[in-house]
Amino acid sequence: MTDTRLRQVPGMGMVKGLWVTLSTMFKTLFLPKAHLATVNYPKVKEQPVPRARGVIALDQEACTVCMLCARQCPDWCIYIEGHKEEKPPDKPGGRIKVRNTLDRFDIDYALCMYCGICVEVCPFDALFWSPEYEYSESHMGGMLHDMDRLQDWLLTVPENPALEN
Amino acid sequence: MGFLTDLFSNFWVSLAGKLLLVGLMIPLVGLVIGFAELKLSAKMQARIGPYFAGGRWGWAQLIADGVKFFQKEDLIPAEADKPVFKIAPILVLVSTVGLLVVIPFGPGLIFRDLSVGVFYALAISSLSTIGILMAGWSSANKYSLMGGLRAAGQLIAYELPLVLAVVGAVILAGTMSMAGIVEAQISSGYPYVIFQFLGFGVFMIAALAELTRIPFDMPIAESELVMGYLTEYSGFRFLFFFLAEFANMFSLSAIAVTLFLGGYWLPGISEDVLAWAGPVILMAKAFLLVFIMIWFRWTFPRFREDQLQSLSWKILVPIALANIAITAVFKVVF
């Protein structure tokens, strides 16, 4: 019987479905290495793709406290405080320079929805995506990452992939 | 041994013994089937499933789950009809316990061999419907009520084919006693499924619907009714429903085995061996049917409410009636 004729038999779809689950069950039971779709997580870890949205890293040197990220954040989970510092002019007789310095840059990952708008909107390349994902906490407060912790995530940010020709 | 016989001939001692046996059996069977479901569903979906609980294969996963349920707060909604809300899960579990009474586990190994055993089993299994309806009504929650009413509609629709499917086996055996049906199968030398395959099929489909398991889980239907009649339940009351579902899977399978698959009997095994191997054979057959139920659950999508009803009234009931007519003619002619 050809395949199309077989398909016309009533109830064939049900038999097919039953066969799929049964054969998958035996395959995963006896040949788990070849057929498992998941990994045994804490023992075996999967390598996340380089552009995975795991955690947001902050480059404090690049940040100018422009607040664009905090204002664009749909969840309002970014808290920024800063102050202006006056610096002496480079040349004698020049103007006094005013620089914004960062006092506080917190991201509350309990609120964050990983949309990445802050990373997109940052005009000074101070925010980056890192594929790290293991930062769960037993207390809600621990999900608020301060700027030092965000700076540490910067070490895990992968190199930019090479441009296509 | 004489001392033991004397001890168990005392009514109260034997009653306590039986109660203990049932009280141990339901959680044990529930744990085994629940764990089998967790692991088998994982394998069917190419997953690993529970792994760490208990050190190996995650065997203690369901024990941990049970302990978790006991830790949970026993919430009763403010608007709920409190006594009814409290009684409902117990009623559902009672119907599960009641089913075990008439299942023959071996020759003479039966809690009570009622002369209307089949009738009693079907009647007591429909008691859980009342429990479910009570749970749905008393929760004072629209999803619960919808779930309860759906359960009532579904169980009325599927009680009929369930009863009609059994009639064939009863006609062949000429008795309604469960032990009598098994003995009739032994003396005729074949399990009734050979001639009652229609009845067996209808019985299994209707039993799946009675259990409100996928593909017949409209009363729970997570995606539309939250959790149906279970929505407001928490803690050990939820555990009761949970246990009752798994234990009911076992006891309805055991009834199907008794009626159609020869119960504790296998062809070619002598009486002496049956005396001790009977419960093992019955359990093995019942767990095979439970496996099929689990297999169906993880294969098929949920029926729509109207499909559910038309399957029962337009297909299963006529098939069961035709099966009765054919069996009756067969019985009279031969």
Image (cartoon, helix red, strand yellow):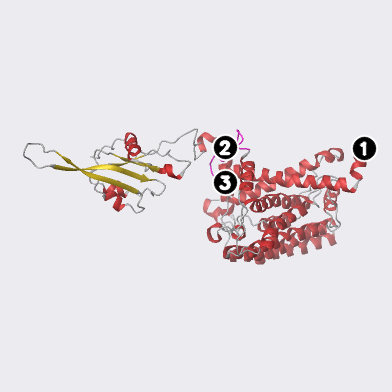
Q: Is residue A73 above or below residue A92?
A: below
Q: Position of residue A72 (x, y in %)?
A: 30, 53
SS at circle 3: helix
Q: Chain of mark 2?
A: B
2 and 1 marks in contact (CB < 8 Å): no
**Residue A45 appears anywhere in the view:** yes
Q: Position of residue B214 (x, y in %)?
A: 60, 55
Magenta residues (range): B45-59
Specify the amino acid type for callout 2: Tyr
- Count every numbered label the image shows and give the total: 3
Specify the amino acid type for callout 3: Thr
How many angstroms separate mark 3 from mark 1 (CA)? 53 Å
Q: Position of residue A159 (x, y in %)?
A: 29, 35
Specify the amino acid type for callout 1: Phe
- Look at mark 3 in the image and give the residue it sits on: A21
How many angstroms separate mark 2 from mark 3 (CA)? 21 Å
How many angstroms separate mark 2 from mark 1 (CA)? 46 Å
Q: Nearer the viewer, residue B105 or B61?
A: B61
Q: Nearer the viewer, residue B147 or A60?
A: A60
